[in-house]
Amino acid sequence: MKRIRNFCIIAHIDHGKSTLADRLLSFTGTTTAREEQAQLLDSMDLERERGITIKSHAIQMDYIFEGEKYVLNLIDTPGHVDFSYEVSRSIAACEGALLIVDAAQSIQAQTISNLYLALENDLEIIPVLNKVDLPGANPEEVTDDIVDLLGCDPDEVIHASGKTGFGVENILKAIIERVPAPKGDENAPLQALIFDSVYNSYRGVETYFRVFNGEIKKGQRIKFMATNNEYFADEVGTLKLKQVPKQSLKAGDVGYLITGVKTASEIKVGDTITTVENPTKNRIEGFEDVKPMVFAGIYPVDTEDYEELRNSMEKLQLNDASLVFIPESSAALGFGFRCGFLGMLHLEIIQERLEREFDMTVITTVPNVSYHAFTNKNPDTILLVNNPSDLPEPSKLNRVEEPFIKATIITKSDFVGPVMSLCIEKRGQIVNQTYLTPERVELTFDMPLAEIVFDFYDRLKTVSKGYASFDYHPTGLKASKLVKVDILLNGQSVDALSALIHADNAYSIGKKMCEKLRQLIPRQQFDIPIQAAIGAKIISRETVKALRKDVTAKCYGGDISRKRKLLEKQKKGKKRMRQVGNVEIPQEAFMAVLKLND
């Protein structure tokens, strides 16, 4: 155990985590020249296309230092705030963290929030200044920033370059010297933490775990404490580039376990594994509960695929524990699921993964949050409104309460003005403003959760030029003046497009939605009226003009009454068409609401 080191890599987006991980793998000889490629650990197509890390990736390296052989378990984590749950799970399985800072961009939002996550778990932090070879790098100034943030000595900051491999040896030396070896008792009852799992269609669920105490052996009877289910450990092993089966893993090791479980719901991330013969009394404290920010409905295009979608979502939930879902139904779209996500990028990635990995074509409804409604008849009975179509009629409605949050934003002092005006536009009220340093300010706001759902993150990043970290926690519900804006197509209400909006913004949002839909809905043989309504009152209207066919082209010369007769005939046909015609709504229309400010 003295020669094991468990560490993860944390940083802001694009500060070079995955590239540095590649250099560590090649320097320790974990990968051969043939296997090497950029962002080697990012195995998903989506990750490679977008150039972002979506999943944490665990891998084991062997390294000989001063004649001794050390085992280094590395976890590469995502940088985007929407995948911060992945980071918190990785941190729970480690004793140390490499905090990487870009020498050109300095300390940024996620650097700070990931650092706080690591400090809460008492991890040893090794600061690494990456990209020092860039022409725009400013190593001295950024080193001072790191020293201010961590309170360490300037000599402790390691200068490195993920591109050229400069400084990699110093990083490995620092990991061995500074990161503490895992503590644990090999003779105690088995206690192992599940920090991730993936579904393999041939072998069932593969569970990734970290042993804190005791030993896990192949063929042993084991028990998962949260579900109380018992299994045989069919295969245990360590995670190199490919899985390496072993006879046993002891305290301090990180590895994988295959039990032949085929049902995704039987395995919970954060659970504790122990043995049946000699079980441990104490569970390992897992990580914080996931708090979804955005709710949206996901429906199969074909209603018959509902069960298949449920299976796909369960398998995806194994791989991404921050996804939560419950069944729901809609008049326009049939049966589907109401899902909770950590943000808009998370929603986009889940939708994309369902289509790529499980061949499920899905429709996503307009994202929203949960409200409490009260009627005049029963003013004390809470009606939970997850879907705007569940809201009672305006005449019966007493009041609606919406969830509020306390939002904390850390930004540079230059951007306080734009950030404040954005939050006030989103119905936020400033509670506190603290200068952490002359350069960095912490702003606290009371805001409705619904206002941060759509484009708040994107706009916050835009007004602060990428430098703003955002965190929040719920503070309860408050009564608000909310109205339901319905969208009518050809006189029919489309429940998947309705939204609950504050009365002051209802008119402008209704108008924008109609304009946006007019651009997206394809033209038919008849006029399609698009209307926004509050109750029975129409507040906005646009029309998608019909495709015209010149029926009078063949009438050249002769009496005008011939032309009129043909036009009248066509008019009747259009009218009938409009009564029986069905307006197809493209998928982009459901997501159009999110891009109203573009």
Image: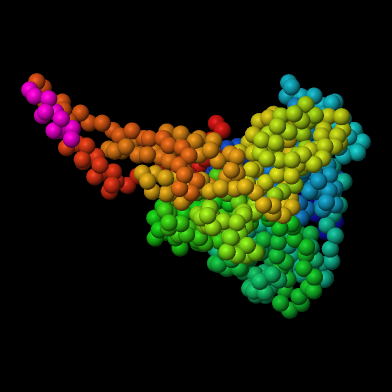
- Residue 184 is situated, as x and y percent measured from the top left of the image, at 84, 63
Magenta-tinted stretch: 558-568
Say if the magenta span includes residue 168: no
Residue at x 45% of width, y 42% of height: 538
Q: Quadrant of the C terminus?
A: top right
217 relative to 45 in the view: left or right: right
Q: Residue furthest bottom?
A: 277
Residue at x 90% of width, y 33% of height: 154
Residue 301 visible in the snapshot: yes
Say if the magenta span includes residue 563: yes
Which residue is nearer to you in this view: 74 or 328? 328
Which residue is nearer to you in this view: 160 or 338? 338
Q: Residue furthest left?
A: 558
Q: Is residue 4 above or below residue 107?
A: below
Q: Quadrant of the N terminus?
A: bottom right
Q: Is residue 552 above or below residue 589?
A: above
Which residue is nearer to you in this view: 501 or 250? 501
- Residue 534 is situated, as x and y percent measured from the top left of the image, at 50, 46
- Residue 8 is situated, as x and y percent measured from the top left of the image, at 75, 47
Q: In which quarter of the view is residue 413 placed?
A: top right
Q: In which quarter of the view is residue 145 placed?
A: top right
Residue at x 81% of width, y 46% of height: 116
490 relative to 392 in the view: left or right: left
564 relative to 278 in the view: left or right: left
Residue at x 24% of width, y 39% of height: 574
Looking at the rendered structure, the number of numbered marks drawn on it comes to: 0
205 relative to 76 in the view: left or right: left
Q: Is residue 281 above or below residue 33?
A: below
